[in-house]
Amino acid sequence: MTDNTKINLLDFDLASLENWFIQIGDKPFRARQVLKWIYHHGVTEFDAMTNLGKSLRTKLSDLAFIRYPEIVTAQLSSDGTRKWMLKLDEKNSVETVFIPETDRGTLCISSQVGCPLDCKFCSTAQQGFNRNLKTSEIIGQVLLANRELGAYTDGKRKVSNIVFMGMGEPLLNYDNIIKTINLLTNDLGLGLARRKVTVSTSGIVPEIDRLKNDTNVSLAISLHASNNELRDHIVPINRSYPMKELLAACKRYTESRDDEPITIEYVMLKGVNDSINDAKQLVKCLKGLPSKVNLIPFNTFPDTQFQCSDIDTINRFRDILIQADIFTITRKTRGDDIDAACGQLVGKVLAKSARHNRSQKENVHVN
Ligand code: SAH
């Protein structure tokens, strides 16, 4: 078999890998053995899987491979944040960011090449959209980060938390996100607790309900506005799923998780959504919804029409929420010297639907 017809085993979660073993005439329990090698030991060669017989190892090499995305560039910020640009194929790259903190290491992963949504303040959005990432390309970001951080040499898992806050809208790549979450949370995979995995969405309402039924990971909502009219403009998916429906879906989600709060993300845009009145309206919107708010200082990028709110304005906004008993933090900007902060991830997108010439410019700096 050529590499083109071989299968990347990183595309399978436990259930689908068991099926595959049955299809190739083998025992389903082999799936458990293989997953452990891949996810517990970082093994990518079948010959290293010593509890599989020689003939099975040869058969697996004939039919399949285990391959991570390829590193194009690796950058290290002065604050310890790391960013990798990863090549998926000849035309597409995405970015992955590792944010170390004292008690944890959070990996921010991408789910699409570019993004089909058109949030006005987001750099990824300006590039247009090319395609969904495969499961292997999403879980591959996590395996690669662990490998680069030395997890398989010193035996300590480096990535303790996952946020789907890189490029793309995860709930528009639903099936692959679910398979990835299965691999992240299964003990044979990375064995992370569900609350340590956060899916961030701009508000694809039907998929929020599906996610509630299929897995109860942590949820973050990119709200960014406290009234429907403004949200229609800055987060245009709101025209399909208005705020009222979105907030009702959030309520259903929290009810299914014993009122565990969801995270509300709110980017601070000077003169756009940062007034006292906006803060008061936000308090009203969130009434009755178990939630905590992350205020995100706007991260700038070339040719944007937006500016970040002043620190005093952000603090005033935060205080109004806190006075209303809403747990609120201002998100620290990490890795901004390497453009690794929220909304700054660009990768390389052969955009079928590039929105501005800017994206062409960006396509030039990597190969
Ligand atoms: N599409 C998903 C995942 C992206 S998460 C979502 O919308 O939730 C990235 C977070 O950073 C989102 O809340 C996004 O709205 C926010 N963001 C985008 N551009 C930003 C910018 N320039 N500055 C700060 N935050 C930004």
Image: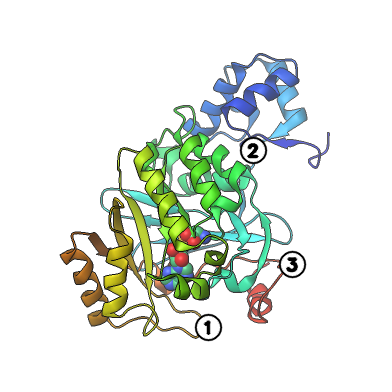
Nearest to the observer: residue 281 or residue 260: 281
How far apart marks 3 and 2 lie (CA) works out to: 24 Å
Percent of width and height locating residue 127:
63, 71
Q: Nearer the viewer, residue 210 or 38?
A: 210
Q: CA distance from mark 1 to mark 2?
A: 36 Å
Q: Is residue 149 above or below residue 281?
A: above
Residue at 45% from the left image edge and 83% from the top image edge: 306
Query: In the rendered view of the protein, which quadrant contains the N terminus?
Result: top right
Quarter the C terminus occupies:
bottom right
Amino acid, disc 1: Pro
Residue tagged 3: 352
**What separation in Å lies between label 3 and label 1 (alpha carbons)?**
21 Å
The part of the image, by quadrant, that contains residue 282 is bottom left
Element assignment for label 1 = loop
Residue 73 or residue 203, whichever sits in front: 203
User: As shown in the figure, which amino acid type bears the numbered disc 2?
Assistant: Asp
Mark with earlier residue (3, 2): 2
Give whichever of discs 3 and 1 has the lower sequence position.
1
Residue denoted by label 2: 11
Q: Is residue 123 visible?
A: yes
